[in-house]
Image (cartoon, rainbow, N blue to C red):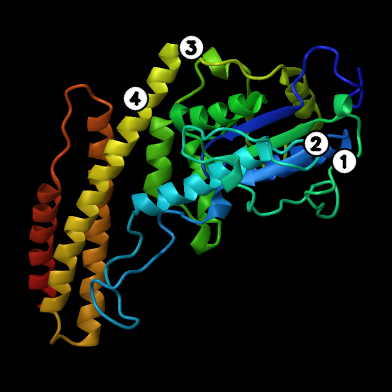
Amino acid sequence: MSLQEPPDDGRATVCLLLLSGLPGAGKTTLARALAQEAALQGVEVRLVCFDEHGYQPGSGSRGGDGGGGNEPTGDEDAFSPQAWRLARRQSLNQLQAELTLDITGQRQQQPSTEHGASTSDSSSAPMLPHLSGPPRPRQQPPQLPTSRYHRLVIADDNMQYRSMRGQCYALARAAGAAVVLLYLECSKQLAQQRNAARPVAQRVPAATISRMAAQFEAAIGGWEQRCLVTWSSEGAPGVTALWRHIWRLWGPPAPPPLDTEAAAAAKADAQAATAASQAHAADLATRRVMSQCMQRLGVASAEHRAAAAQRLNTARRRLLEQAQQRAEEAASSAEGRAPEAAHWAAAFQRECEAILGEVG
């Protein structure tokens, strides 16, 4: 059967292609290549890149706790759970909107989903190009019979935790879409190399990539049974062959997950929220210490202030990475308990005293 013929095997009209892999694995490059290949076969394509919704830890954001003007403040690369959650919610809203767009260009009326968004809230999602040609207005979908119309929605994100992929699966299930998971295999070394070659503003902290590689949760069957694995390379490897594998896996609408799987996903979400809350508390506590230390340097020369701020920021970032790791480890352990924010504040205070004594 050619890809343009009406399906006779119960294939869903819409399919969610869920990309997963380390930063630098080549997911965005492959996503665009697959989008073009699918479009050549008469499939409408929508690409949702989670990075386009804003927040990237380690992007060099600055705050004003340590001083004024353009002076170093010691607040570079601070992790903000609130900003991360907002960016992810916006991405999920857009994903839901693309999954629920029917062939007349109208939004299907869907109830609110697990992440708190409804399709009525998603109508303002930015227009994405139909990647086989120029942008196409939402009000003018392909003029194909309903039985021959297919839409592929590609979610481009790291999706390192199964619970993250579970959120997207839930949206696809509610929209009556099929789901195919595509994991892009890439070594930590290659990911680090490619990440270092990116523009500074687009780089992910090296420690984040290392931690992500160590904690990456592979698909283990169940609702992730329709999974493909391909190796990362400099280009888009075997795109035509890979697309045909995806088309064969594009089956009926996703069935509901087993209760045990849903419970496990909910538990993982709760663990991630707990870890993020603890890391945020440590961030705030050490930020207050940083501000106090910078105030003590008020009479120092600009050169001494800059040198001290750089060393303090490095020490603070290292402690926050430790706090994040300890919080994640404790959240995933039945008996584990992460140190309180006061512990990290006291540890940072000791480092501050030593650094201030040296730059005096």
Residue at x-position 63% and y-position 36%: 232
- Sequence-wise, the earlier of marks 2 and 3 is 2
Label pair 2/1, CB-CB below 8 angstroms: yes
Look at the numbered disc 1 and give the secondary structure of its residue: loop
Q: How far apart are marks 2 and 1 (CA)?
A: 8 Å
At which x and y percent is residue 352?
12, 64
Q: How far apart are marks 4 and 2 (CA)?
A: 36 Å
Q: What residue type is labelled 4?
A: Lys
Label pair 1/3, CB-CB below 8 angstroms: no
Residue at x-position 68% and y-position 44%: 47
Q: Which amino acid does label 1 sit on?
A: Pro
Q: Mark 2 points at which residue?
A: 103
Look at the numbered disc 3 and give the secondary structure of its residue: loop
- Sequence-wise, the earlier of marks 1 and 4 is 1
Choose mark 4 or mark 2, whichever is in front: 2
Q: Distance between the residues labelled 1 and 3?
A: 36 Å
Label pair 1/4, CB-CB below 8 angstroms: no
